[in-house]
Image (tube, grey):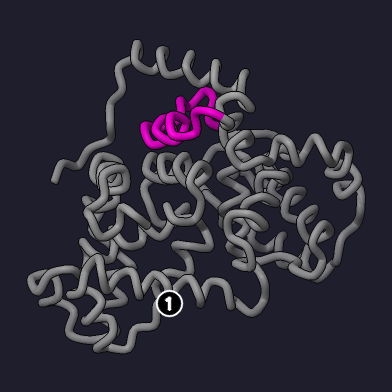
Amino acid sequence: LEKATIFIPPEVLRQRESKWLDMLNNWDKWMAKKHKKAKLRCQKGIPPSLRGRAWQYLSGSKVKMEQNHGKFEELDQLPGDPAWLDVIERDLHRQFPFHEMFVARGGHGQQDLYRVLKAYTIYRPEEGYCQAQAPVAAVLLMHMPAEQAFWCLVQICEKYLPGYYSAGLEAIQLDGEILFALLRRVSPVAHKHLNKYKIDPILYMTEWFMCAFSRTLPWVSVLRVWDMFFCEGVKVIFRVGLVLLKYTLGSPDKLKSCKGQYETMEKLRSIDSRYMEEGFLILELRFPGSCVKHF
């Protein structure tokens, strides 16, 4: 296994940029006729200079923002529920504390994060705020201004991961059961082991799925996974989960050190970095084994 970040020569990157620019400038035409090609381009990775714009087009948040002109400004001016604001305030410094945008308490990154999360609690008062939304919103803010990040977050919460951030966690539990059922096909060894020690999927996959792996994978891998996630939806998150489970617990050799529930959970909390590297993981996602590819 190569510990690798994929290197793209500058001329290839420039070529990709011009292809993406053409696609973004003729978006409706592309989506109507060449969706497969767009999907392939997302799998190859969106050029960094166009990533924020591409995510907005792919998620439909650009259209949503245009349909709700001035709405974010209006939400931004409202005071919000003090109970939610207190919890949001406490979470701000925990998001990517070493990133230049979020390093300073009260800095512009933290302020924008506060504005986006507060606006969401007013926009969806029945849902309010969930801690897993903070890292997701922070990743968006690294790629786009606050208003765009807000509408992108709305799309993630409503279109991509509906019900994930509601109080009861029913949606995440249901997807945990689906993940476990798929694991039986992908890696019977891992499935049998987790079953034997009665390790409920919610114990290991909640943060993975709710944060869309933003707190689990190395940064370059997060961005590549999100490129595919915005294009193909939640099945990409399932595929990542299946790859990590298969390569962490999928052979008798790997299970030697997992004598019980505690040891297994420890192994899943500190997954071997080789399996999360961009070079390995993206290859697995783009060309999955026969068990996963139709999912």
Is 284 covered by the magenta stretch?
Answer: no
Residue placed at 38% from the left, 36% from the top? 43
Q: Residue furthest left?
A: 253
Q: Nearer the viewer, residue 206 or 185?
A: 185
- Residue closest to the far front: 33
Q: Name the residue under label 1.
A: 177
Q: In which quarter of the image is the C terminus?
A: bottom left
Does the magenta portion include 34? yes
In the rendering, at what x and y percent does residue 285 appear? 31, 47
Judging depth in this view, the residue of 99 and 143 nearest the camera is: 143
- Magenta: main secondary structure equals helix
Residue 198's x, y, as percent?
Answer: 32, 88
Q: Which residue does the image show at 54% across and 21% down from the upper left?
A: 23
Against 6, residue 83 (above or below) is: below
Residue sitting at 77 percent across and 38 percent down?
65
> Which of the 4 image quadrants contains residue 189?
bottom left
Q: In this view, does 282 lie above or below 211?
A: above
Query: What's the amino acid at mark 1?
Result: Glu
Question: Could you say where residue 249 lies in the image, as x and y percent from the top left?
Answer: 20, 70
**Residue 103 showing in the rendered view:** no
Between 230 and 267, which is closer to the camera in this rendering? 230
Position of 150 relative to 84 (above/below): above
* Residue 127 in sight: yes
Image position, residue 267 (x, y; %) = 26, 70
Which stretch did the figure color magenta? Answer: 33-51
Tag 1 secondary structure: helix
